[in-house]
Image: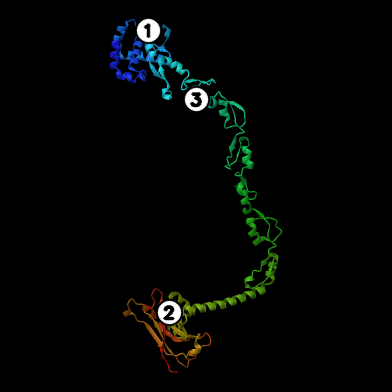
Amino acid sequence: MVTRCEDYLQSHQVFLEHHPSHQGRSNTWVRKAFEFAVHWRFLMCTKDSPVTFAKRLDHNTALSAVSSVWTFVCEGVFTCPEDNLPLDYAKIYPDPDAEVAIMGSVVYCIHYKEGCKWSDELRKLQGHLNMCKFDAIPCTNHCGAMIPRLVMEDHLLYTCPKRRTRCEYCARDFTGETLEAHVGSCQLEPIYCENKCGSKIPRRQHNNHRQHECSKRLVPCRYCQKEFVYDTVQIHTPKCPRLPVSCPNRCDVLKIAKEDLEVHLSDHCTALTLPCTFKDMGCKFKGTRSALDQHLEDATKPHLLLVCGVVSRQQHHINALRTAIQGLTLNTSGTLLWRIGDYSRRLAEAREGYELCSTPFYTSQYGYKLMATLFLNGNGAGEGTHLSIYIKILPGEYDALLQWPFSHTVTFILYDQSNTAEQACNVVESFVPDPTWKNFQRPSKEPDALGFGFPRFVSHEVLKKRSYMKDDVMYIKVKVDGNKTIAV
């Protein structure tokens, strides 16, 4: 049988090295265990002789035998390799030599992976396990848990459901199981306010704190009913648009919402002192709303006189501004280029007797002030058939320094707006002033007369034949030549 065992060990060396029964053991120990297992199986399960049985032993049978021995060593229980039923150790035929060899082999503690450093003979293993701090034993509180001796004290103090403990807040006694249910519901446990105000109060006082004491609770403004955080509502109140305030004029209305005060003062306050509507015209009256209404009824004529005075002053101011503007855009070249736009409309208006007047211009910076006038439908001898044009002498700022009567040659030019200059045929008329005619004397006021010019400057028929009008626009030049004068 020993020879058969050696053959088995050599042919299954790799298997034995990886089997749990071989870990931490020598091959000699495995051989002893194998011999013991063979004797045990032979005695309990066969009628063959040990030698015959060893010769027909196969791989699976040997493995089962060695595993059964290892199970017995670790757990103290033998099982039949055929049906895995437990066997009574007392009924097994003993083999003292094999038992001594096996039980005297050196082994490690079964908890060596957990950190136990114990190592000694196999027969001392059970005695070691009775004291090994890594070996699990039933909880002494009978909670049913298997706890290593190393952590038994912590288990009894903190995790055992059967432990006796006391709530640190209400001082009531609980078991571990009931304490877990109690934690989180103890009414005396301090908890932080849900509104995040930073306060920590007992759970049973939380609702009252949140509703009546918390600085972060929402409270409505007593005037506008909008909700604000409690510690900001005091800032809001003085600025609340619905805050009741007293009328500054101490009228009959006791309290007015702040946002309505302006409307009250402008439209409803009976005690407000109001200026007269015509104060910008010079009226000095001030009084209550009712007194003002009576004043407006009684002072109609004085108010009208004030308005007329203001209008007169404004007119003088407007004239001064117009003169200043004209001075800024003053034409002092002695030549006026006059653009008459919207000719068709102006011609229709001219049939009603309208006269077109140009902007004033000067013969020089300090020269004569002139203005051209135009009758599109004609005037005098040219009425209805011709275009009439005249020149007027206006009162100027430097007339006292000029020579009179006016003696410069005046030329009127109506431009032909043909596409090329060679094809253009302008209408040109000139005259030399008559020194005996009163219109060329120094004017003392704006002249009412026509001035001097050409009532039949150009006929309407001629205007239609050429490009004197283009895009409903006409151009006329008035030129005053100071070099061509009459002798006076």
Q: Secondary structure at mark 2?
A: strand
Q: Earlier in the sequence, mark 3 or mark 2?
A: 3
Foreground of the two, 139 or 383: 139
Q: Is residue 159 among the parts visible in the rendering?
A: yes
Tell me where residue 477 appears, x and y as whole percent.
Answer: 41, 81
Q: Quadrant of the C terminus?
A: bottom left
Q: What secondary structure is marked by label 3?
A: helix
Counting from the top left corner in percent of width and height, residue 465 is at 36, 79
Residue under numbered circle 3: 151
The mark tally for this picture is: 3
Q: Observer-nearest residue: 195 or 11?
A: 11
Between 232 and 245, the one nearer to me in the picture = 232
Q: What colour scheme does the image use?
A: rainbow
- List the single residue furthest toward the bottom: 488
Mark closer to the chain start, 1 or 2 = 1
Left or right of residue 480: residue 62? left
The answer to whether residue 380 is above or below residue 37 is below
Q: In the rendering, at what x and y percent does residue 200 appear?
A: 60, 39
Q: Which residue is mark 2?
A: 338
Residue type at the position of mark 1: Met
For this orientation, the residue located farthest to the right is 252
What numbered label is drawn on residue 44? Answer: 1
Residue plotted at (45% across, 74% down): 345
Q: Residues within 10 Å of mark 2 (few under 14, many from 20)?
A: some
Amino acid under label 3? Answer: Val
Q: Quadrant of residue 317?
A: bottom right
CB within 8 Å, label 3 to label 2: no
